[in-house]
Amino acid sequence: MFIHHKLGLGFGAIVGLTLLLTSLSWQNTQIQVKLERSRDTVAQMQEQLLEARRHEKNFLLRRESIWLQQTQSALDQLERMVQEMEEKAFFNERPYWQRVHEQLKIYRGHLLRLLATPELGYAEQYAIVESDLVPPARELHALFKTRWSSLSQSHRDHLARSEQTQSVLVTLAIAISALLVWIITRSILVSLKMGMQFAREIASGNLRARINHIPRDEVGALLRAMQQMGTDLQRMEERDLRAQAARLALNALLESSLEPLSLQRQMEVALHIIMTVPYLRLKNKGAIFLIDPEEGQLHLIASTGLAPAVLNGCAKIPLGHCLCGKTAAEGKLTYATDQDPAHSVRYAGMQPHGHYCIPIISRGVVLGVMTLYLPAGHEENPEEVAFLTSIGNTLAGVLERKRMEERLQHLAHHDLLTSLPNRVLFAEHLSRSLILATRSKERMAVMLIDLDHFKQVNDTLGHAAGDRVLVISTQRIRDCLRASDLVARMGGDEFAVILSDMPNLEAAERVAGKIVQQVSQSIAWEGHSVHVGASIGIAFFPEHGSEADSLLSSADMAMYRIKKRGRNGFCIHDPDWREDQAP
């Protein structure tokens, strides 16, 4: 065969192979595009489901039905996407999408039931969410994750088959055109193949792709630059995702502090927020302790996932004891990869685990400790430590805010000097007591107590002595009452008492006599013996009034009557008594 014929056949083969390669590449591209679109759709479905779950959590935190409605809107959008994929699916994919559709219907059904019963309490709504909404949502997450893995595997398998086919055709082309391209192909073929494979991996979003062997030539330099670019992109993406997750957690923690939650509930929400940070390798176990300065101990205030033995053993922890007590005493974050001698609280059946114990510090003062459980052998991560330290500082601010609110609430309803309930809080207690007494048909008594000769103490010995008399008299009155009774300072030297569940008039008289006896005892003040008395007016429910104003008015009239008699005693209201009568 002539040389030009061979060349013609060779070039013809090369052209044919080129066209075939082009056709295969086009088909591969179409298949890859389809796989990419499917993966994008699954990713959008995952994001839509996460959006629904976020609205669901907002509902639990804020208790507003609009978040359930937004959850339903997100599920409607997700259902339209699932229906579209189900209509376009091949016969072997249809059962999968039908299963997804069924789980979605279950999720929507429970959500509609929750929307249809807005009168449910928080505990009932929370139980419905945990028992009815969470399982189908998790099943949907698992289905989407399985589908994503399946599509990714199909993508990789297709790329592998495509590369094998192309390798065979390229080898055949090289064999036919060996005389023409031998020198060039020999030096660059391997490098180009690795570059193509690496470029495809990067283009598909696999930033973890690596080249096993990079040649020492110009193409190799290009491949090294491409690999470094992929590494940098991967690090940037992971860093951005972690930073975004950290910001979201801190924002959620700060937003929850604005909600009208109790301190215990606030700490439970904080634990839940921390457990949902995706890049933290935490076990779903943790607790928050607060320091009681008087006892010098940590008190367990919130926990999640802990066994009963842990809850009992860790209800109170002395400072310096175990890992949490050590953290509180030293004010430094403690890390443990597994149980060590410092982990002194142990119980039967305890599984291997590690700990992050984070101090909650405000202005140099340790307020408490947050402990998080880690898988055994987990290595300490500086980025995790920095984030958890920020969480601890944020919790300190939340605690200070909550305690300030409690102090302001206390000041608004209590007397500064005696710490007794003030007139406002007394009125609220009296109204509730009357409602309970009316419902249970029980007798109750209201006393008004006025300290006799108190003005003389202020005038002769000064206001400091008067304050001392008020504090001691308050304690003496308290000592005469039961735990279920209430004493309040109405202003100046006047006090009011609610005696609930009085079996008879004599029981109230015994209490009043005891108060008169105790208050009239002398009080030492800077070398002086101070004496005051107590004039007490008593009114009974329902005999002397069924409303707060009428009872107080009756008790006031009785107190006025005992003052007319000579003070330092008690008197029960008499509806027939008039001021112009003899004492």
Image (cartoon, rainbow, N blue to C red):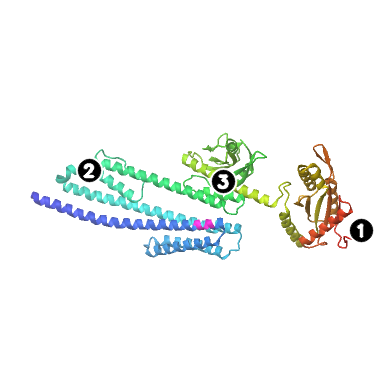
Among numbered discs 2 and 1, the one appearing first in the sequence: 2
Among numbered discs 3 and 2, the one appearing first in the sequence: 2
- Binning the other alpha carbons within 10 Å of mark 3 as few (below 14), some (14 to 19) or many (20 upward) gives some
Q: At x 56% / y 65%, what residue is drawn?
A: 116
Q: Which residue is mark 1?
A: 582
Q: Which residue is mark 2?
A: 188
Q: Which residue is mark 3?
A: 397
Percent across and percent down for residue 499 are 79, 54
Location of residue 195 (image quadrant): top left
What is the magenta segment's predominant secondary structure? helix
Disc 1 marks which amino acid? Ala
| Stretch in magenta | 53-58
In-image side of 38 versus 311 (left or right): left
Percent across and percent down for residue 81 are 42, 62
Location of residue 543 (image quadrant): bottom right
Mark 3 and mark 2 residues within 8 Å of each other at the beta carbon: no
Foreground: disc 2 or disc 1: 1
How far apart in space, not on screen, are marks 3 and 1 (Cα)?
64 Å
How far apart in space, not on screen, are marks 2 and 1 (Cα)?
125 Å
Q: Is residue 55 magenta?
A: yes
Disc 2 marks which amino acid? Ile
Which is nearer the eye, 500 or 464? 464
Is residue 276 in sight in this rendering?
no
- Binning the other alpha carbons within 10 Å of mark 2 as few (below 14), some (14 to 19) or many (20 upward) gives some
Q: Where is 503 relative to 385, above or below?
A: below
In-image side of 45 versus 454 (left or right): left
Percent across and percent down for residue 247 are 48, 48
Foreground: disc 3 or disc 1: 1
Among numbered discs 3 and 1, the one appearing first in the sequence: 3
Instruction: Tell me the quadrant of the picture where the C terminus can be found.
Output: bottom right
